[in-house]
Structure formats: structure tokens, C-alpha cells
Image (cartoon, rainbow, N blue to C red):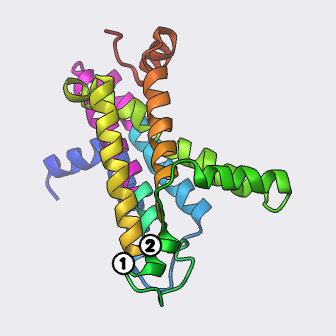
Amino acid sequence: MSKISSKIIKENLLILISVVIVGFNLVIDIIPNLMLDTKMKLITYIFSMILVFIDMKIKCKKFSNKEQYIKRGLTIIFIIYSILISTLLFVDGNYRRFGSNVKIFSKEHFEYYSNLIPFRTIYAFLSRIVEGTINLNAVLTNILGNIIVFAPYGILVPIIFKDKFDNVKNFILLMVGTVFIVECIQFITMNGALDIDDLILNVLGAVIMYGLMKVKIIKQIVYKIIGKELE
């Protein structure tokens, strides 16, 4: 191995370790009947993102063009997080609630795997809490979980793609389009449902975080953490 190659590997070791971790998770997801526990998957992906963040901070202190390394680091974190969300939504296979006997685009498919009435799913969860027929953790997972899952994009997207999405209208359109595509894929693959309430909650979480980033003190804290100069 040449000295140049060794130097590149040494300088980007944390990034390479992160890539290996993500790659390992993807291989596990591909292999039939072999799957990491969801908690373990979250831990490994979060660990890989932490490694990228540490690499970004080291590069910012070591080199003068820190804006370049901040954008690179956040972009890699954005990609890793997107892969994590994609595997949880499309690969886990925990949401095929009615088995594989349901034919695609059949009456049963639309009945079991879609909800186009706003707030029907949310109301159903809240009603079952009042009736005491559902575990509170299930409600928190489905309602708060849907709010939280896309929230990080409210921080990452405006920073990485500032020229295009540092505008609330453009950001909302992006998130609505993205989540709608996700919901459609879940519906077609039957790994989840096309649920208008999921779309509302997913977009709401991202927009709330986007709005918080417009609050000066919160923006200052976030920018200080990542080492970015406040504009």
C-alpha cells in the first residue's frame, strides 16, 4: 500500500469505520431470516453517525476550510440516517400485518393498508387509551414516533441544502413529497400502510424542528455544537 493511500485511510479512518458498520447492517438486512434487533440496529447506526460527527469536529480543528468539512460531515450523517429510516420502514418486515395472502390493489389491500381520512388513526389510538384497551407505549411509538422520525431533517436539510430549502414553503413541499412517496412504497410493499395521519405527523415533526431552528438561541446552540459560524 502506498504512503498516499495509507495517509488517506488514516485521515478518514472514522468515516471508513462508519461505512463498514452501515454496510454490515445492510448485509444483515439482505440475508433472509437474519436480522438485527431494532434496538441494536438503532445503536449501531447512531454509533456510526457519532463517528462521522467526531471526524467532522477533528477536521474542523485541523483544517482551515471547516465549512467544507461541516457540510461533508452533515451530508454523510444525512445519508446514514436516511438509510436507517429506509431499512426500518421497508426492510424490517414487522408491518406485514395481514400476511402475504392479500393481493396487491385488491379491496382487502386498500381496506387493510390505507387510510385517507385525516386524524382517523390518531383518534382511534386516543380512544383506545381512554377505553384502556391499548398499551400506552404503543401509542407513544405510533404517534410520538411518527413525529420524531423525520424531525432531524428539519435541522439537516436547511443547513446542507441552504440555497434550495432555507425557505419554509420549499421545505414543507419537500417533506410532503418525500413522506408521500414513503407512504406509497409502504402501501405497495405492504410493509406498513398508506396513512394520511402518518404523513401529517411526519411532516409536522420536521416542520416543528425547522421552526425551532429559526429561533435565534436554538440556532446558536446547534451551530455551536457543529462548529458552524452563525450567519
The residue labelled by disc 1 is 105
Instruction: Specify start and end residues of the magenta stretch as a single range.
Output: 54-83
Q: Give the image location of residue 199, x and y in percent.
A: 45, 48
Dot 2 and dot 1 residues touching (CB under 8 Å): yes
Question: Above or below — where is 118 with respect to 214?
Answer: below
Question: Above or below — where is 221 with respect to 177?
Answer: above
Category of crowding for the residue at label 2, using alpha-carbon neighbours closer than 10 angstroms: few (below 14), some (14–19), many (at least 20): some
Number of numbered discs = 2
Tell me the residue at 40%/59% (across/down): 183
Question: Does the magenta segment cover residue 168?
Answer: no
Spatial CA span between label 2 and label 1: 6 Å
The residue labelled by disc 2 is 110
Question: Does the magenta segment cover residue 70?
Answer: yes
Q: Give the image location of residue 230, x and y in percent.
A: 36, 10
**Front residue (pair 219, 145):** 145
Secondary structure mostly taken by the magenta-highlighted segment of the chain: helix
Where the C terminus falls, by quadrant? top left
Tell me the residue at 42%/26% (across/down): 210
Category of crowding for the residue at label 1, using alpha-carbon neighbours closer than 10 angstroms: few (below 14), some (14–19), many (at least 20): few
Q: Give the image location of residue 196, x and y in percent.
A: 47, 52
Give the farthest residue toward the right. 132
Where the N terminus falls, by quadrant? bottom left
Dot placed on the residue nearer the N-terminal end, 2 or 1: 1
| Label ID, residue 12 | none
Tell me the residue at 59%/68% (across/down): 37
Q: Secondary structure at mark 1?
A: loop
